[in-house]
Image (cartoon, rainbow, N blue to C red):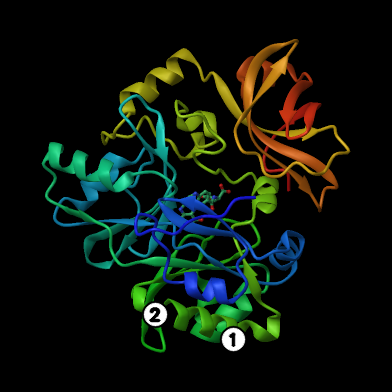
């Protein structure tokens, strides 16, 4: 076991001090920031997410803001999803690709008032990419990282808790829609979103000096629901088939190979980065699919997976394993993988390399639950 040395190169979020005070035990690095991963009892954190309500510091979901006369056109140029019907107050899950059609990120894009957009990003250097493209294309927009830090409140009791803090009207908020609001003078955006399928919200704090204050208010209101600290839950997200960009996929993956085909509109009128390459992918055929695996093993000690491992068929590599967990609800060990299309279509049993050994695995569709 090694420890992480904090330095000014690695940013902490406005909720970091509150998380440490709450007993933070494990962290990882994400977007060059500290991402909490556990408070010392992974099973209790899982149970709280499935049955109760949990609070997560996800300040690592860094924002890139676009603002200016060309913001609509610029946002569209970055996204492989048709944004023409997008409304203010709405978020959409989008793929951002490079010119070869490889996916660079899978953010939630939010359309705010005043012609602003936020890319709420997964792990990559997207501010650099966005600044370069905007400058080269001559879009009339400002691109920068605003003072915004998401705090997730997830689980079946999140709705009652958030209704108590913000009012009953929040129950009408549709999935991925949001309100620009405040909590006792703390400016924030309240969004019905989050990296779990258990329901919940994200509070996008807009004043980095008030992280502990916001955390404490949510904890105080959540006490009667037995709220507790947690982190983006690896087991639940595998069960739900939610993509972890950069972990589940190889760097040369296109959106069709990470399960984002249904959010990819190559036939729209507007141009976007990677459009020509993605059209060609559909002509040539999609080579790999993002699938679930049910792994035949009694060894439940399969976490963490420190690197993607090969998946083989008759000794030949046919895919890569990106995640493997023991599912408490299924009572099975399950994984997420990219596997060659013809192997998926054949429905055969493959062999996975996992922490501790190799095991046969059956291919299945996502989500598991
Ligand atoms: N919230 C916010 N920003 C984020 C994440 C988030 N940035 C990083 C990362 N998570 C981005 N990745 C995802 C992946 C999946 C989903 C959201 C963000 C998600 N997907 C649902 C699904 O696939 O079933 C719903 C998609 C849909 O119906 O449009 O929720 O969590 N702010």
Tag in front: 2 or 1: 2
Quadrant of the rendered image containing residue 277: top left
Query: How far separated are the C-alphas under marks 2 and 1?
Result: 17 Å
The percent position of residue 138, horizontal first and vertical second, equals: 11, 41
Q: Which residue lies at the image location 55% right of the left edge and 81% below the top edge? A: 218
In the displayed structure, would residue 20 be above or below residue 42?
below
Circle number at residue 184: none
Residue at (55% x, 35% y) in the render: 259
Residue 205's place in the image compared with 343, above or below, is below
Q: Nearer the viewer, residue 321 or 307?
A: 307
Residue 221 - label: 1
Mark 2 surroundings within 10 Å by alpha-carbon count, few (fewer than 14), some (14 through 19), many (20 or more): some
> Considering only vertical position in the picture, is 156 above or below 232?
below
Say what secondary structure mark 2 lies in: helix
Q: Which residue is mark 2?
A: 210
Residue at 76% in and 60% down: 43
Please give the name of the residue rendered at 35% of the width and 78% of the height, measured from the top-left corner.
Answer: 209
């Amino acid at each position: 076991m090694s420890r992480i040395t904090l330095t000014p190169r690695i940013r902490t979020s406005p909720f970091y001090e509150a998380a440490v005070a709450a007993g933070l035990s494990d962290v990882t690095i994400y977007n060059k920031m500290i991402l909490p991963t556990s408070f010392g009892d992974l099973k209790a954190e899982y149970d709280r997410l499935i049955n109760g309500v949990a609070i997560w510091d996800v300040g690592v979901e860094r924002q890139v803001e676009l603002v200016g006369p060309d913001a609509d056109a610029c946002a569209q140029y970055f996204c492989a999803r048709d944004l023409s019907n997008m409304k203010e107050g709405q978020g959409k899950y989008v793929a951002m690709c490079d010119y070869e059609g490889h996916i660079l990120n899978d953010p939630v894009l939010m359309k705010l008032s005043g012609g602003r957009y936020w890319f709420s990003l997964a792990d990559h250097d997207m501010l650099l990419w966005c600044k370069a493209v905007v400058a080269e294309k001559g879009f009339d927009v400002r691109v920068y990282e605003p003072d915004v830090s998401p705090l997730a409140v997830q689980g079946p009791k999140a709705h009652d808790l958030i209704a108590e803090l913000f009012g009953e009207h929040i129950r009408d908020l549709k999935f991925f829609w949001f309100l620009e609001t405040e909590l006792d003078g703390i400016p924030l955006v309240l969004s019905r979103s989050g990296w779990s399928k258990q329901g919940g919200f994200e509070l996008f704090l807009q004043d980095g000096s008030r992280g502990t204050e916001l955390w404490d208010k949510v904890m105080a209101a959540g006490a009667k629901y037995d709220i507790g600290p947690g982190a983006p839950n690896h087991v639940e997200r595998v069960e739900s088939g939610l993509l972890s960009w950069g972990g589940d996929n190889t760097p040369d993956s296109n959106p069709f190979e990470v399960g984002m085909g249904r959010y990819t509109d190559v036939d729209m009128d507007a141009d976007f980065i990677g459009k020509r390459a993605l059209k060609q992918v559909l002509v040539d055929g999609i080579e790999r699919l993002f699938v679930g695996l049910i792994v035949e093993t009694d060894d439940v000690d399969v976490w963490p997976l420190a690197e993607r491992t090969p998946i083989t068929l008759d000794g030949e590599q046919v895919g890569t394993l990106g995640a493997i967990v023991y599912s408490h609800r299924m009572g099975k060990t399950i994984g997420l993988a990219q596997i060659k299309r013809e192997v998926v279509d054949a429905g055969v049993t493959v062999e996975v390399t996992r922490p501790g050994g190799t095991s046969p695995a059956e291919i299945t569709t996502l989500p598991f639950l």
